[in-house]
Structures are given as structure tokens and as C-alpha cells.
Image (cartoon, helix red, strand yellow):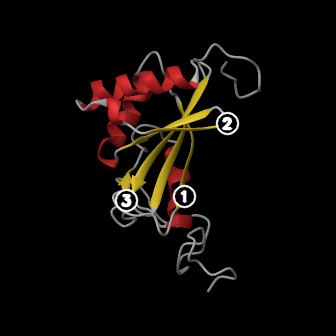
Amino acid sequence: MAIRVDGASASGLSQDALAARIREVYTAATGGSGDHLPEESFRGDTWLRIPAEHSLKLLRALRDDPTLAFEMLLDVTCVHFPRRPAPQGEFDVIYHLLSVSRGHRFRLKVACPDPEAGVDSACSVWEGANLIEREAYDMFGVRFNGHPDLRRVLMPEGTVGWPLRKEFPYRGF
């Protein structure tokens, strides 16, 4: 059963039903098959890995789909895997989506092999992506292409390096 933000039961879709519907929306939005999207799960929380080249198109479709209605982007973050081989590469960009009206939430992961090439910004889909994408950029150095103001927000300008990358020195530079 889905849980609302306040912890109460909601009428939202289950994680399995969300994954199935997101695959359908992916197929409709991109013309590719959503059946190949890798699915992972941990402690009842499921997520799908989506290709970077379709991320913006899919995020917009997930917001606009009446069944899913992901009106809110809760968070954008990254994870650094320094020794993970291609094609996934070193970084994952992770989107946490919430449907307030439907009472469900879901997580999507996008592999980002090259932080300089980055991924597309979600600012055109949710205005709230502006600050959280800047935070992810500031901590990990992953670029968000098309972002209206991609610059450091937590660290001072001129800071060398990316503090949440695994190779960053424990005590800084």
C-alpha cells in the first residue's frame, strides 16, 4: 500500500504497478520499448534505470500522465561509483518523484558516464529543479544541460573539486 508524505495510507499505486505504468509511458514517449529498462528493488522500494538521452522526455511525460501525475520533483542527487565500468560509468543521477494528488512516489536513476557531458536539466519540467540541480552539480560536478543558472550554490566560487566524490580528500584541499 502506498504511503502519503504524512505517513497515512494513500490510494496511490504500488511500486510494481508504478514500474509497469512508467514502462508504458516510456514506450509511448520515446518510441522505444520500456521492457528493457532495468529494475531494482530494496526493502520494498523499486526504481528504474532510464537512458540519459530520453530522461527529459520521460520526466515530462511522467508529470503529464493522468495516472501517474508526478507533480513534484522531491530531490535530484547523484551517487559516485569510481570503479564502475562502462557503459554506466562513474555516476548515477537520481530523481525522486512524488504525486501528491495520487499518493505515490517513485525513484528513477540515470547513468551518467561523463560528468562533463552530464544529463538534461529538469528545470523545464519542474521549476523547483533549479536549486536542487545546482546542489548536485556543486557537490558532484555533474552538469545539467540546459540549466538556466548552473553555478555553485553551497561551496564558495573558486572551490577546487567536488566534495561528495569519492576521491575528494577527507579534510579538503
Between discs 3 and 1, the one toward the N terminus = 1
| Nearer to us in this view, 160 or 68 | 68
Disc 2 or disc 1, which is closer to the eye?
2
Contact between marks 3 and 1 (CB within 8 A): the answer is: no
Label 3 vs label 1, nearer the camera: 1
Residue 68, position as x, y percentages in the image: 48, 21
Q: What kind of element bears circle 1?
A: strand
Q: Which residue is mark 2?
A: 43
> Which residue type carries mark 1?
Val
Q: Going 33% across and 35% down the picture, which residue do you hit?
A: 36
Residue 15 screen position, x and y as percent: 56, 26
Q: Which residue is mark 3?
A: 118
**On-image quarter of the N terminus:** top right
Q: How many marks?
A: 3
Seen from the viewer's position, the closer of residues 132 and 38 is: 38
Label 2 close to label 3 by CB (< 8 Å): no
Q: Looking at the image, which residue sits at the far top? A: 11
- Mark 1 packing: few (<14 Cα in 10 Å), some, or many (20+)? some
Q: CA distance from mark 2 to mark 1?
A: 19 Å
In the image as oriented, which residue stretches furthest toward the left? 31
Residue matched to label 1: 79
Rendered residue at 38%/37% (across/down) = 37
Location of residue 103 in the rendering, given as x and y in whole percent from the top left corner? 62, 20
Circle 3 SS class: loop
Which residue occupies 37% across, 59% down? 118
- Disc 3 versus disc 1: distance between alpha carbons? 13 Å
**Rendering coords of residue 22 (x, y %):** 42, 27
Single out the residue that lies furthest toward the right.
7
- The extreme bottom residue here reads 173
Quarter holding residue 13: top right
Question: Under tag 2, what secondary structure?
Answer: loop
